Image (cartoon, rainbow, N blue to C red):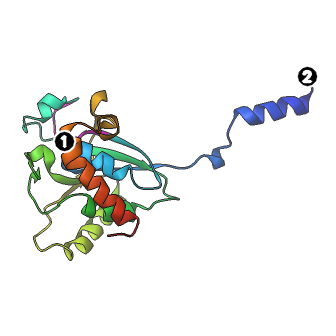
Amino acid sequence: MKLPFLLALLGTLFIPMNSVAKTESLVLGGGCFWCTEAAYELLPGVKKVISGYAGGTQPNPTYEQISTGTTGHAEVIRIEYDPAKITLDRLLEFFWDAHNPTTLNRQGNDIGPQYRSIILYADEAQKAAAENSRTAAQATFRDPIVTEIVPLQKFWPAEAYHQNYFKRNPNQGYCQYVIAPKVKKLTEKISGGK
């Protein structure tokens, strides 16, 4: 084989580092992670959403442990996104539309500290963005926002059956009566239909 052919072949096998889209992540919780996962999957620029647990002390928690409300963890999602296509500010702005941040330890019929409103920041820039976003959002709510803004210690991915739950179980009762209407409302808002 000739050298130009080998170089051309190698060029197809390796992607230059500068052509790989940079991704960043944000961890937050707004009630049931099935709902928040389905909501954030609507946004262009979001590459992946992973349901999980964070904010507590129990190592490697299970859904059954979280459901007791005694682990300190909240049901959260980790959003992996392309900052060239969607900003951190836009993700945070969407957060206030995707749930009710004025109810302490609950979203609708989901009650307990595992359903609290929470933003877990990875660095000081995320902390400042979250605090600024919360201050701006407060003007749109009559009741005080109770969202916690705390440092992320560790994100624990939830069990496989929780991932992509709405997409995999659209006919399940909770999905039909809770998630589907929320997704419809948010889709209309994203498309400008309010």
Q: In terms of depth relative to the viewer, which is nearer, 14 or 153?
A: 14
Q: Can residue 133 be seen in this view?
A: yes
Residue for point 30% across, 53% down? 183
Give the amino acid at mark 1.
Tyr
The segment highlighted magenta reads: 51-59
Is 83 located above or below residue 153 in the figure? below
Q: Residue furthest top?
A: 1
Q: In terms of depth relative to the viewer, which is nearer, 15 or 59?
A: 15
Residue 1: which disc?
Answer: 2
Residue 61 is situated, as x and y percent measured from the top left of the image, at 19, 30
> Could you tell whether 145 is left or right of 51 in the image?
left
Residue 174: which disc?
Answer: 1
Residue 32 is situated, as x and y percent measured from the top left of the image, at 20, 45
Residue 4: which disc?
Answer: none
| Residue 101 found in image quarter | bottom left
Q: How crowded is mark 1: few (under 14 residues within 10 Å), some or many (20 or more)?
A: some
Element class at badge 1: helix
